[in-house]
Amino acid sequence: MTVVPPVRVFTQNALTGEWLSHALPVTDLEYGPELSGPGTLTGKITPRLLSLHPELAEPATCIYVESAAGQIQWGGLVWDVRAEGEDYAIEAASWSSYLQKRWDIDGQHGGRGPYTYTDRCQIIRNIWAYAQSVADGDLGVTVDATTSTSTVGTPAEPFKSDWWDNTSLGDQVDSLVSDVATPEYTCTTTWNAAKTGVVKRIRLGWPRLGARRTDLTFASGVNIVQDPTVAQAGDDYAQVVIGTGTGDGSAKLRKIAAVRNGRLRMEARVDYPDVNGNDVLGAKVQRELVWRQVLGSTDSITIRDTPAAPFGAWQVGDDVYTRVYNSWLSWTGWCRVTGWTVKPAAQGGPTATISLKPSSMYQYGGV
């Protein structure tokens, strides 16, 4: 994603595809993608201008951000417009947010399930295919043909989507990408080749999205423009994680993951009430143990466009070496980009606020 201010914001009817506004006057604009999530857009519009753009008050109007170079940088659905002081605040989220408003009313994704040893990527495609096959439900989203070796369902316990289950289709997708060594996704938007329509895409990644980037750096004094917080507290720290799943009393599933590292023993207990398999529970507990041993990290930085990490050079899921230092701390380490938001009209020039997690938290599956 290349950020070239100024940007143009425009809207479209989500069902018919009719263009509604070609230059929406949004201020305080901030937008960006997310790892295994929709990503968000926020902004403001004056009440006078809102009256000229009634589509913003309609549920799920499509909204897009385009650079001066004519590239769509973000696309999604407007979910909330409300008075905030002298303005109306706009909140939008990208395409996967739509599935939070949809349920499997027919069961088994319209006969596509239940699933036994089925690739999680295929189930995600089935969920989208089912959602968009129902009348007035076609958002025009395409899902990558990526395949993985991460499967769900067994003959004894197939993966099901029952019509009486209250789990939304969006929560089903989240469950398929939230374990250790599972596929990842992000939402992207581009013009089609003729620039007459928009390509709304769910990018699936296996064994991961992004890559380790030795050509980029986030560093204080180079491109980080604010002093980020580096958490050093031990409130969440533990070398022993006790995880429990379904069942009662002595029949309750339990898995323990532990390491010894020369520090005073700390334990954490985590309950997964919906997990009914020992393998899944063990993987979740192991992942919990990994992140609970991270002592000192930063979860957000704000940078400007520099050769050390030019805007548009990094992608969702990339690992970037990060150096944070000032008069009272010094911290370095590999961090994974889990999302970002861009402020094209920030004071002093465009900025990007990047969400980070320690790269050591992630374990990837193989093909």
Image: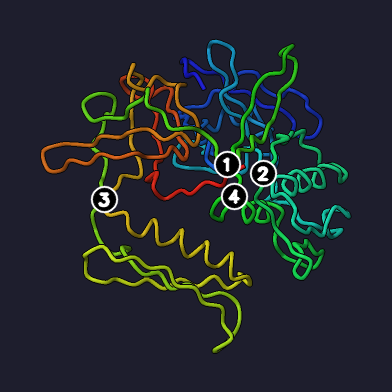
Dot label at residue 296? 3
The residue beneath circle 2 is: 148
Rendering quarter of residue 85: top left
Pointer 3 with pointer 1, Cβ within 8 A: no
Distance, label 4 to label 3, CA atoms, is 26 Å
Mark 2 secondary-structure assignment: loop
> The residue under label 1 is which amino acid type?
Pro
Mark 3 secondary-structure assignment: loop
> The residue under label 4 is which amino acid type?
Thr
For this rendering, which residue is in front, 11 or 326? 326
Q: Residue at x 47, y 42 (%)?
A: 84
The residue beneath circle 1 is: 207
Residue 80 visible at all: no
> The residue under label 2 is which amino acid type?
Ser
Distance, label 2 to label 3, CA atoms, is 33 Å
Closer to the chain start, of discs 4 and 1, is 4
Crowd class of label 1 (few under 14; some 14 to 19; many from 20; radius 10 Å) = some
For this rendering, which residue is in front, 156 or 79? 156
Instruction: Answer left or right for 361 relative to 261.
Output: right
Which mark lies nearer to you, 2 or 3? 2
Instruction: Answer left or right for 325 relative to 260.
Output: left
Pointer 2 with pointer 4, Cβ within 8 A: yes
